[in-house]
Image (spheres, rainbow, N blue to C red):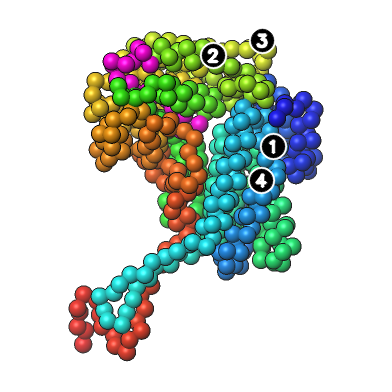
Amino acid sequence: MTALPPDDFATVLQRCGIDLPALSGTDIAVRSPIDGTGLARLAARPAAGMPAVIGRAAEAFESWRLTPAPVRGELVRLWGEELRRAKADIGHVVSREVGKIVQEGLGEVQEAVDICEFALGLSRQLHGKTIVSERPGHRIMEQYHPLGPVAIITAFNFPSAVFAWNAALALVCGNPVIFKPSEKAPLSGLATFKALERAIAQFTAQFGERAPAGLAQIALGGSDVAEALVDSPQIALVSATGSSRMGRTVGPRVAARFGKRILELGGNNAMVVTPAADLDLAVRAIVFSAVGTAGQRCTTLRRLIVHRDIKQALLDKLLKAYASLRIGDPLQPGTLVGPLIDQAAFHAMQDSLAQAKQQGGTVLTGGQRVLEERFPQGFYVAPAIVDMPGQTTIVRHETFAPLLYVLAYEDLAQAIALNNDVPQGLSSCIFSNDLREVETFLSAAGSDCGMANVNIGPSGAEIGGAFGGEKETGGDRESGSDAWKQYMRRTTNTINYSRELPLAQGIHFG
């Protein structure tokens, strides 16, 4: 795929189904982090109009929940086909709006396609359980039923995939969705949503009125729109992706009304490299995990915990790899590191570097702004590696940038303790060919993260497994495995098919 000139971006948006004139306004200024170019100015949905949006979703739920799950799966299949057809265009929008390199933009849309395929299969497997009863002539069963309207609030760094992760499962499970994309990446969200709208139109042509009005809605706006979703008792589930700070606000507010939530929050992910590791393999994983998406993934590698005996050998290889990184326009072939999302992200990285130095760290490479003359409004940085004397306060803090801290350890127990001694608990990994080390890291006495990998980095998760983490990461799961259960309500049923009425626990009454 070749880069498109700026004046062709409007054509890409049109092919994605985005009518910019119809969406124009003064509330949301969308700029490209590549060079600061303004991409659009959009109108936000007034918070005062959100009750009507939520009401339409609640009304849609009344009929969608009764649609057979395999039929609901057909809608998601159609969505996947639309995403596949529009993959190049949506991927380009993601790259232009978020600053991802071309391969990462395409990969994000592929994640959306993959979750639609997963959800299609799931539509015939929303199974419950049959449980034996202690009473004769009785049986117990569990069923899963649709939950209700689902609000999906996403962050800028995965504006397409995270919406699809949630919406595909929510729709198959019988729930309408309301999508609130990040103000920093509304066009990517719109492009993905428009593919869903086209799928709904095809579904309606095939099945008539099975897809009710209000089944899928998008609400552009700021925190006031998000708050309306978070606080509404008609929203059965709020799925929110963002910082731990955001989660501390959303979680209690949803809990105050006894709603359900899925929180996907901060990550401070570590890799343990032992003397039994393949160092060349580890270096390849470190580079992708630490600098991909310019360090702006929730699963980005931020801490490298390496055995003291091999630390210098690993650093020599890693510094050589970092020296060859191509930083630049993410739309150009060969670029590996694009820009930070904005100036605030750059300043946050510089502040973290300053604190790391104050806390005894040595910057081994990177950290400085680059390409400023070519892109005065784009914030490109050289990925940084900082050798730290220990796990200081700044190391325990998540910095959303390509900033990798290096820590030395003496034995595996110390390495695991360092891995776990941070507030976040999203992803982790170990590089080792020693079975005992690997199994210890994966055991109950090992990593306390929601994801623990072996000989692969902490990022780049597949959709087949449940995604999420512990502690300040939120404790919830989305995407694969049995994460679908969070989008449904469970009911336990006891059926008496006898002519008697025995009581449980052997109780005699009367």
Q: Are marks 3 and 2 in contact (CB under 8 Å)?
A: no
- Residue type at the position of mark 3: Glu
Quarter of the image for residue 412 reads top left
How crowded pointer 1 is (Cα within 10 Å; few <14, some 14-19, many 20+) is rated as: some
Residue 231: percent from left, percent from top: 51, 50
The answer to whether residue 286 is seen in the rendering is no
- Three-letter residue code for mark 2: Ser
Q: Earlier in the sequence, mark 1 or mark 4?
A: 4
The residues tagged by marks 1 and 4 sit, at their Cα atoms, a distance apart of: 9 Å
Amino acid type at circle 4 is: Leu
Is 273 on the left-hand or right-hand side of 146? Answer: left
The residue shown at (48%, 38%) is 461
Q: Which residue is mark 2?
A: 324
Indicate the secondary structure of the residue bearing disc 4. helix
Mark 4 lies on residue:
83
Q: Which residues are magenta?
A: 297-314
Image depth: mark 3 or mark 4 in front: 4
Q: How many C-alpha atoms fall within 10 Å of the one at disc 4: few (<14), some, or many (≥20)?
A: many
Q: Which residue is mark 3?
A: 373
Is 510 or 323 nearer to us in this picture? 323
Q: Which residue is at the front of the view, 114 or 34? A: 114
Pinpoint residue 425: horizontal percent, then vertical percent: 37, 36
* Disc 3 to disc 2, C-alpha distance: 21 Å
Q: Nearer the viewer, residue 339 or 230?
A: 339
Q: Which residue is mark 1?
A: 88
